[in-house]
Image (spheres, helix red, strand yellow):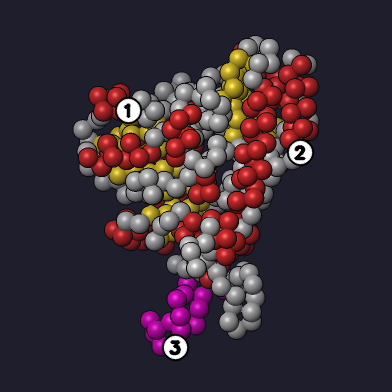
Amino acid sequence: MTEPGFETRVVHAGYEPDPATGAVVPSIALATTFAQRAPAEPYGEFEYGRSGNPTRAALERAVAALEGAAHGFAFASGLAAEDAVLRQVPLGGLIVLGNDAYGGTYRLISSVYDTAGWSWSGADLTDLDAVVRDWPEATRLVWIETPTNPTLNVVDIEAVAALAHERGARVVVDNTFATPYLQQPLALGADVVVHSSTKYLGGHSDVVGGFAATNDEELAGRLGFIQNAAGAVPSPFDCYLVLRGLRTLAVRMDRHCANARLVSGALVGHPAVDRVLWPGLTDHPQHDVAKRQMRDYGGMVSLTLAGGEAAAVALAGGTRLFTLAESLGAVESLIEHPGRMTHASAAGSPLAVDPALVRLSVGIETAADLVADLLEALDRL
Ligand SMILES: Cc1ncc(COP(=O)(O)O)c(C=O)c1O
């Protein structure tokens, strides 16, 4: 049999029907400790709930397999996964962060790591000439988000990974927006992939979680060690929810992408809209890179309003179907004002966002309803 397609693998990865009961989905294994035959001789793989758990192991096998990784680690949140990865940078090493990234990632690097002895600098990772020209000598890690949150820029993973590796730095890709269905960062040369599984992997706005996956044996050993030693692990129930959501990732992503295509097309040219940012638009500055490295262009659409911040705030509060809320990547459509909400922590920094920007997480509802909701709210501005 030829290698099964992603849609097949996403349904089955990480779990085989239990030989004892035939259960076709893993149970939520609540035990915090596992009996041992003799001291330090466990019956099987598990000893203690923080160190490992059957439900978590099924999720870890599944997401790792979908990312093409030999090793995967589930965490209690996306930021906990990021923290475990950042701890691998030697003290004093420099972290290069794309200058358009999730505000919480910026806050973690600039207000936790920076004050504890690591340094960082922002870079426009879409401009490869500038990356080479301004490369800081002490760089140990390059943190790529692509597409970026919230302006949906696209970074050429293969090119940045090659540059970083030539200069002795590792590369992390935050694959939250694209998911392994649309983009495979490890195959493009990244060393680690991280996720906020709170978003598309879970897909239903009902679980907070994070993930890190890698093929680097040494890094995997360190990540597993930190997962256990620092203990930011997800509960078995949370692992179950992420795994349950994951099974429909491919069909959800197809609908997210199709709806985002229709929504972005409808916004282009509206007199209240200045720019529409979606990598699938042919005038998107990195459309060609997106076309090369992604299967489709994702469900996130951002726009800037001709009427500036006041219009952006009014639009964010003016829709009916798009709920005004932080987060993204779930079945229901959400709208937010990054400058005042998700990216407020980046105000005044190189990562500060345009106050005229509104971000849409386009859900899987009927596309015409979503378009009508947005156009009515825009017409009211
Ligand atoms: C791209 C991206 N990465 C990481 C995170 C952090 O994940 P979490 O909220 O699960 O800690 C977020 C959260 O919004 C995000 O959008």
| Label 2, ligand 1: CB separation under 8 Å | no
> Is 187 left or right of 25, judged from the image as shown?
left
Which secondary structure dominates the residues rendered in magenta?
A: loop
Label drawn at residue 37: 3
Label drawn at residue 283: none
How far apart marks 1 and 2 lie (CA) works out to 39 Å
Mark 2, residues whose alpha carbon is within 10 Å: few (<14), some, or many (≥20)?
Answer: few
Dot 1 and dot 2 residues touching (CB under 8 Å):
no
Q: Residue at x 34, y 46 (%)?
A: 189
In magenta stretch: residue 5: no
> Does residue 168 lie above or below 29 as drawn?
above
Can residue 92 be seen in this snapshot? no
User: Which amino acid lies under the numbered mark 2 shown in the image of this protein?
Assistant: Thr
The answer to which image quadrant residue 369 occupies is top right
Magenta stretch in the rendered image = 30-50
Which marked residue is nearer to the observer: mark 3 or mark 1? 1
Q: Which residue is mark 1?
A: 128
> Does residue 170 lie above or below 232 as drawn?
above
**324 vs 217, nearest the viewer:** 217
Secondary element type, mark 3: strand
The answer to which image quadrant residue 98 occupies is top left
Give percent across and percent down for residue 333. Answer: 70, 37
